[in-house]
Image (cartoon, grey):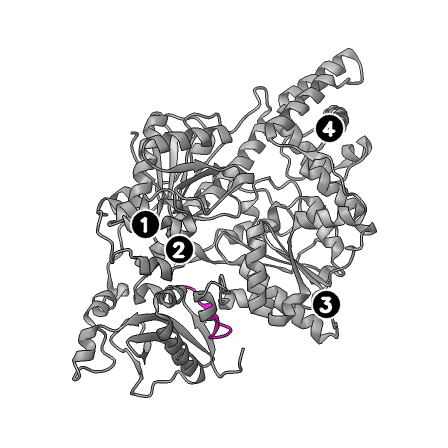
Amino acid sequence: MTKTQWQPLIKPVVLLDIMKLPPKEVQQVMEKITLLIQDPRPDGRTKKQLLHVPGKPYRIRSGRYRIFYTYNQHMVSIYKIDRRNESTYKDEGAPEDAPDADELNELELDESELPPTPRTDWEHVYTHTTNQALPEPITIEMLQKLRINQAYYPRLLRITDEEELINCPGVDQDTMTRLMDYLYAPPLSEAMQQQDLVLNEVEDLLRYKEGELLNFLLKLSPEQEKYAHWSLSTSGPTLVKGGPGTGKSTVALYRIRSLLERLLQQGHKTPTLLFTTYTNALVKSSQQQLKQLLGENARYVQVDMADSIVYQVLNSCGMAKFPALFNSNSEMQELTRQAIAETTFSGSKLQVQVQKRIIEQMGTDYLLQEFHAVIIGRQISTLADYQKTTRNGRKLRLSSTHRAAVWQVYQRWCQILQAAGKETWQQRRARAEVLTPKSPLYHSFDAVVIDEAQDLDPSSLRLLLQVCKAPNRLFVTADANQSIYGNSFSWSDVHQDLKFQGRTNILRANYRSTLEISEAARSYLRNSALEPDETGEQQYQQQYQQQYQYSNNGPLPDARTVINNAYEVKLLKNFFKKASLHLRLTLGSCAILCPSDQVGRALAAALTESGIEATFMAGRDLDLSHSGVKILTLKSSKGLEFPIVALAGFTTSSYPALPAQGTPEEIEEILHRERRTLFVGMTRAMRALLVVIPHQTTNPLLQGFEEAYWNLHGTI
C-alpha cells in the first residue's frame, strides 16, 4: 500500500455501492477516496461535516455522487456512496452539506431517544410485513453489472415483487444474495454500524468490481487487536477463547502477521508458518485474506485443513494406500455390533455374563465414543494402560471389569475393521500422529496457528504440535461451548506442552448473532453446566456468563410446540416466508438443522410439496450456493452460519438415541453432549431462530427454555 497519512477503511455496503457505479464513476470515486486518504479534514467546499445527521459524518462530492465518511487521527472510514438527489443540484441556494429529503427521512431519527422496544415474537414482528413491489425493476443492464449468469435471466427478469424474489427457484444462493443486496442496500444509519473492512489499496475496489478480489479483511476491534499481539514472548502456547461470532478466526489471521513480523525481526530469512482451518472454502478465503494482510510475505504461510496435514504426513512416510473410510455411521455401528457378538469374554461364567451385560447397557454409540475419545485418542495400546487412564469428561464410571470387557470388544473390533479393509478417521489421524517424528514435516514450521481447535481430534492436535518447532509459537482459538464431541480431554491431557495457564483470554464482543439469539442459546446451555476441562476452565465458564457486547439486535427467538409433523411443516413454511420478507433475504438464507439424514430428507420432501424449495444436504454433499432452504443435520452445522435458522424434525425422531438399559451416568453424559449439539445449532442463526418442539414431549433436551429469553407459545 502506498504510504499515506490515514489508513483507509470501508464498510461492507461500500462494496455494494461500487457494484452499482458505472465504470467512469468508479474511477472518479477512487480518486476522491485517494484524496480523503491524503487529507480527510473538511475544507468548507467539497468536504463538509453533516452536523444534522446522527453520528455527524462527513461527506465529499464526487460528480453526481457523495461519499460519506468519518475519520480520526490515524484512519478514515468510508461509510457509503450515494447518488445525489436531482433537486439538490437544481437548488443552487441550498447549503452544500444539506442532505436530500430521502436521507433526512432515513437519518434524522435519533434511536437513542426512542422508548425501549417491547420484546415480541417473530410472528408479531413479521405480521406487518407485506408483499411490496421491488424498489427498482430487474433489468438486463442490472444483471450484467452484477455478472450474473445469463442462464438465470429468464427467471429473474420475470420477478416484479418481493415474494417472487425470495421464492425464486433454480437460481444459486450466491446470485440471489448479490441481487438482493443490490436491490436493498442499507441506509447510511445502518451502514455506520457495520464492522470496518481494511482497504489496503484503493485499486482493490476496482479489482472487487471486476471479480478479481473476492473479499476484504475485517478491521480488528481494540479487544481483538490486543489478542493478536498478546503474549508473543511467552514460554508456552497461547489460547484465545470466545463464543460464536466473536471474531476468533479474524484474530487468528492477524496473529499470523504478528508471529511473522517477530520471526523476521529475529533474523529468520525464510520463515515457514502454518494456519489451519476446517473447510476447503475457508482455506481459499483465508489465503486471499492473508495475501491482503501480508502482501508478498504471504508466501511464507501455508493454509490448510488439519486433515490435509494428516495426509501429507502419511504420504511423506510412504503410505500412499489407505484402508477405506466408512461411508456412513450406520455401517460403522453394524461392524461394532458384529464385534460385540463375536467377542469371547474371559473369566468365570458369572464374569462373562456381567461383561456382556455391561456392553449391552453401553450401546454401540457410547462404545464407539469410548474407542475414539479414550483408547484411540490417547494412543492406548495395552489393557494395563487403559485400566490406569483417568477418562476425564466421561461421566460413566468403569470398573476394572468394565474396562476389561470394553478392551476385549475393542480388540475384536480392530480385527474386523482390518479384515474389511476399513478404518475410521480417528484411526487414520492417530496413525499419522505416530509417524510424524519420521516425517519431513516434523518441526518443519516456525509457528502454527490453529483456528477453532475445540473439535479437532486429540491426535490431530498432537500432530500439529509436533510440526511446530517451538510450543511458544503455537496459537490456538477455541470455544469449549461449541464442542459437539464432548470434553473427553483437557488440553494438558492431549499433550503436556498444551498448558495455557496465564496465557488464556476471552473475546466478549459478538458480531454475528443478535443479542437475543446469543442470550437465549446461552440460557439453554446453562441447564447443563459444562465440565471444566483443565485447571482454570471453571473460571472461564464463570467468566463466560458475564456480560457480552453485541452489535445486532432483533426479536426474541421462538420455541413453538406442534401436534404432529404436518403442523410442523406448516409452521416452518410460514416462519421462513415471513422472516425472509421482513429481513429482505431469499429462502436460500434459511436453514433447518435436524437430528438425522432420514428426518432431513423427509422434511425436504414435505416442504417442497408445500411449495417451498428445500434440499437435504449430507455433510459430504454440502452446497451452500444451492437455491432454496438448506436442510442438514445438527452435527454437520459446525462452522456454518445462516441468517434464518429453524431446529426441527424432533416430532418424527427419537433424539437422542439412548441405550435401553443405560446407567444414569451414561444417559447423563449423552444428554450433556447433545445439549451442546443443540446449542451449536442455535448459534448458527444470525437474525432469526425457531425451535420446533413436539407437543407434550418428555425429552429433557427440548425443555429448559426460559421465558425471559424465549417466546413461548401455545400448541398448533
- Which sits in the foreground, 382 or 574? 574
In this picture, is 211 found above or below 387?
below
Mark linked to residue 244:
none
Disc 3, SS: loop
Q: Residue at x 34, y 30 (%)?
A: 609
Q: Residues within 10 Å of mark 1 (few under 14, many from 20)?
A: many
Q: Nearer the viewer, mark 2 or mark 3?
A: 2
- As measured in the structure, the alpha-carbon distance from the residue carrying label 2 to the one carrying label 3 is 41 Å
Q: Is residue 198 on the magenta stretch?
A: yes
Characterize the local packing of mark 2: few (<14), some (14-19) or many (20 or more) Cα atoms within 10 angstroms: some
Q: Residues within 10 Å of mark 3 (few under 14, many from 20)?
A: some
Q: Which residues are magenta?
A: 194-204
For numbered disc 2, what is the local secondary structure? loop
Residue kind at label 4, given as amino acid type: Leu
Residue to which mark 2 is pinned: 148
Tell me which label, 2 or 4, sits earlier in the chain.
2
Q: 10 Å neighbourhood of mark 4: few (<14), some, or many (≥20)?
A: some
Q: Give coordinates of residue 204: x percent, y percent.
A: 48, 71
The residue type indicated by label 2 comes to Ile
Checking the image for residue 417, the label placed there is: 4
**Nearer the N terminus, badge 2 or badge 3?**
2
Q: Which of the two residues, 90 or 119, is positioned nearer the viewer here?
A: 90
Are the residues flagged by discs 1 and 2 in contact, CB closer than 8 Å?
A: yes
Mark positioned earlier in the residue sequence (1 or 2) = 2
Q: Position of residue 21 (x, y in %)?
A: 35, 69
